[in-house]
Amino acid sequence: MENQTETYSEILCQFLDRWSVDKVRQMTLDQYVSVGHKDTFCQWLETRTRQLGSINGLPSWKFGIWKRGDKSKLPQKNYYYDENYSWQKVFGHGRDEAFKSIKDEILQIIDYAERGHFRRIDALHLTQFVKWKIAYLYSGERLIPIFNNGILAKIAADFGLRGNRPYPEIQDEMIARKPVHITTHQYMLILCAKFGGGAKEKAESVERLRRTTRRAAAEKNTGTQTRRGAVTYVATQKHNILQEALKQKLVAKYGEKNVLMEENNVDIKVLQPEKIYFYEVKSSAYASDCIREALGQILSYAHIDSDSRPKQLIVAGQYKPNHDEVEFINFVKKNLNLNFSYENIDLPSAVGAKSL
């Protein structure tokens, strides 16, 4: 039984530590899926990260290739098999060819998820459960971890989406409606409590949300934090990609000599005759989180800067703000009387970034 005191972020941290992108590239078939091994990639997806969104409900064929516990039990006509493994025909004729195709898809999903190109994932062949669970785990918590088709259909209908809507479209609507003041996981629990299957499932979601909220309020961890390396590394890499993309956009607009990186700790500073622009780049998955993390820093940098020209403060992140976040930005501007804006950076080129 999983330790109920583990937080969602700790579980995600453990997954990313065990299955970094480099480790996925080096992953063997036996490390991907096996019988009786709890450390395989598929075991982590289905069991060890269950609190981050369940993908239970389908047999092992959902992983594309699987090792048969009962070697005499052969699959249906849509599969190839050898003495140990079975796999979906769409991935290739031989076991090695199939696994290479599956691993290539996983790496493609990770790349799309990190860059926020979620709609491209739908065209890949892995089952919806598997590919979207992978996408969530590598998305920086941008996606809402709900994968059950029945719950998703109820959410889509409540949002006014008619018919059988593609998964990315439902995700877009969930993200657009996520309130600023709650986390992705709390929002997932709220939606599951409202739209879950039966009374038992709804009651369990409500109880998990209650326990999560209570722990967050009552259990402050003052000890040394561990196992943060993988998440920190991923966030740093994303920050560097965003910073470089924004720099290239600003250089094209203002000229290279006017765009300074990391001067006095400022991510990017743009010098103009009548004004200075201070950019603080954040890699969080939501504009509101980027703003909360950045405002104190960017105000401090502007305060200690000796240049007398007026300063425009800009927080930059990957994603556009949703409706609730636009209201949050306007609230900050009005109540703190700040010359501040938020700008999203489209990857990889950062072309078309918009400000509020």
Image (cartoon, rainbow, N blue to C red):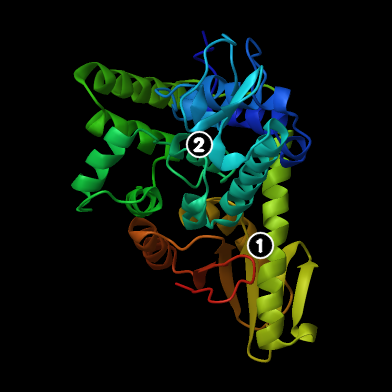
At numbered mark 2, what does the secondary structure look like: helix, strand or loop?
helix
59 above or below 70? below
Residue under the point 78% across and 83% down: 256
- Measured as percent of width and height from the top left, residue 105 is found at 61, 45
27 and 154: which one is in front? Answer: 27
Q: Residue at x 30, y 39 (%)?
A: 152
Q: Is residue 59 above or below residue 347?
A: above
Provide residue 324's location: percent of width, then percent of height: 34, 56
Residue toward you, 198 or 186: 198
Q: Which badge, 2 or 1, is on the more N-terminal residue? A: 2
Question: Residue 285 or 108: which is nearer the viewer?
Answer: 108
- Image location (x, y in percent) of residue 250: 67, 79
The answer to whether 263 appears left or right of 14 in the picture is: right
Q: Label 1, on which residue?
A: 242
On residue 202, the disc is none
132 with respect to 36 (left or right): left
- Residue 226: which quarter of the image? top right
SS under mark 1: helix
The quadrant where residue 334 appears = bottom left
Residue at x 49%, y 53% (from the top left corner): 123
Which residue type carries mark 1?
Leu
Residue lying at the far bottom in this picture: please name it: 273
Can residue 225 be seen by looking at this rendering?
no
Position of residue 79 relative to residue 119, above or below, is above
Residue that label 2 marks: 133
- Residue 244, horizontal then vertical, whole percent: 72, 67
Quadrant in which the C terminus is drawn: bottom left
